[in-house]
Amino acid sequence: MTEKIEENKVNFLDYLKSFSKKFDKFYNQKYFIKNTPKYLKDSIYYVNSTGGKRIRPFLVHECAKLFEVKFEVSIYAAIAIEMVHTYSLIHDDLPSMDDDDIRRGKETLHKKYNEATAILSGDALLTDSFNLLVNNYKNIDQNICIELLSLLSRSAGSGGMVGGQVLDLFPKKKNMNSINIMNEMKTGALIRCSTCFGSILGKGSTKDYKNMYNYGSAIGKVFQIKDDLLDIHGDENILGKKTNKDKIKGKFSFIDLYGEQKAKTIAMKHISDAKDIISSYGRKGIYLNFLTDYILDRKK
């Protein structure tokens, strides 16, 4: 039984790596707007070259596959999600935000170039993500295009990721409710957007959309718990960034609220919930099933 589990882990990691390579090839070819200044292209290429887990675009692709949507169709939605995620990392690293010098083992963009370039590169990625969706889905199905745009704007904006970052930087209270709301907005919103994109692209039913929303919500919570654990115990050489940042900055995390052991127990409950949802899609959801374990097992 243990050997089978380990074999599944290896197979999943190979599958994820294969997807990431295929995704990166498209990502670097498909999203630039004509007449983008070379300096801006270079700065964005630099960020993209630092790698990344590509979890969000993987979720778009795999959730869309549940509804028979091909890679060639879902790839543009996957790229748009990763563009928004990359923008958020660039801005998070700025001195006025989390003030990080290292990301994925390399200099953060504002250290490699300068703050103005980092801000503008993030602005470009965010704005161009919407243009990418319009250009590639308006002629396929205008209703799908509108739904994608609407969901991404809500997930990335003041009621989602940006609002969550504000709550993280300027928390009013340090209790269970405030921590959960902040995490669901800052980390969870874009992950839920990724899973729901799959249902939108595949024209899933209302039940399918709810399933994708709940699956994304569950693994988003696991993702944040693991991030909090890695900030305490992670290996900086593997993580490619500094640890204990939250403690140094006096931030109140999920671990402060529950303690490490209870946090892990809660994460396992969310993993079980996610697997229950995906099980209803049979073999088509096998890699989404493996992903739930990977999110808690990951080292970076």
Image (cartoon, rainbow, N blue to C red):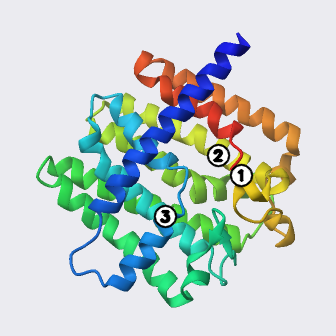
Q: Residue at x 39, y 71 (%)?
A: 125
SS assignment at label 2:
helix
Tell me which amino acid carries mark 3: Ser
Q: CA distance from mark 2 to mark 3?
A: 23 Å
Using the image as rendered, state which of residue 213 and residue 70 is in the foreground: 70
Q: Which residue is mark 2?
A: 223
Q: Is residue 2 above or below residue 80?
A: above
For residue 227, which numbered disc appears in the image? 1
From this viewpoint, is residue 59 visible?
no
Which secondary structure lies at badge 3? helix
The residue labelled by disc 3 is 49
Relative side of 266 to 126, left or right: right
Q: Residue at x 19, y 55 (%)?
A: 136
C-beta proximity under 8 Å, tags 1 and 2 = yes
Judge left or right: residue 88 versus residue 226. left
Residue 276: x and y, percent? Answer: 56, 21
The answer to which of marks 1 and 3 sits earlier in the sequence is 3
Furthest residue in direction left, as rendered: 139
